[in-house]
Amino acid sequence: MIDLLGQANAGDGTLQTNGKPFASQGFYVSTGYKLSQSKLFSCECPAWYKNLEFLFRYEQYQNVEIADPANPSRTNVFETKLYTGGINYYIEGNTKIQLNYSSIRNPDGGSSAPYTFHNPRNNLFLVNFQVAF
């Protein structure tokens, strides 16, 4: 474990001594809606319209671990959240194009924590071509 605040017992900020076990957890929820499999869109819509699939995914993981400045043997765990929305377009058979946008929310440290996390713009737009076998 790296001690980013230089609070390790050795004083050089590189090592967390006498570390204790800690838990880290996470989860995700994912859903999609394919128009071609919907009774609502079985009407006389254009054929290309039925090849669309809409999706949404939410992820939350405790993936940032930092030694506690007051007690270097304790590890504080913070969470990152990720929201993804996208559209899949099925070209023919098992080929599709995917367009996804992901928005990432980094931990803020909370109002009582002495941490200041950087806040880069980690959002991304992904275009993917996929062939399934």
Image: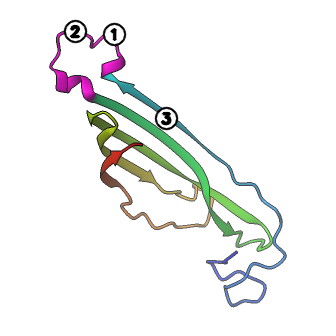
Give, as a single range, the part of the protein colored magenta.
Answer: 36-51
Amino acid, disc 3:
Ser
Nearer to us in this view, 63 or 89: 89
Measured along the vertical axis of the image, is residue 109 above or below residue 9? above
Measured along the vertical axis of the image, is residue 76 above or below residue 42? below
Residue ID for mark 3? 30
Measured along the vertical axis of the image, is residue 62 above or below residue 55? below
- Quadrant for the C terminus, please: top left
> Label 1 to label 2, Cα distance in Å?
8 Å
Amino acid, disc 2:
Cys
Picture quadrant of residue 11: bottom right
Residue ID for mark 2? 43
Q: Is residue 118 magenta?
A: no
- Residue at figure coordinates x 27%, y 14% from the top left: 41
Q: Secondary structure at mark 1?
A: loop
- Quadrant for the N terminus, please: bottom right
Q: Earlier in the sequence, mark 3 or mark 2?
A: 3
Residue 114 on image: x %, y %: 61, 66
Residue ID for mark 1? 39
Q: Are marks 3 and 2 in contact (CB under 8 Å)?
A: no
Considering every residue shown, the one lying at the far left of the view is 46
- Residue at figure coordinates x 42%, y 63% from the top left: 119
Residue 35 on image: x %, y %: 31, 21
Residue 75 on image: x %, y %: 73, 65
Picture quadrant of residue 97: top left
Q: Secondary structure at mark 2?
A: loop
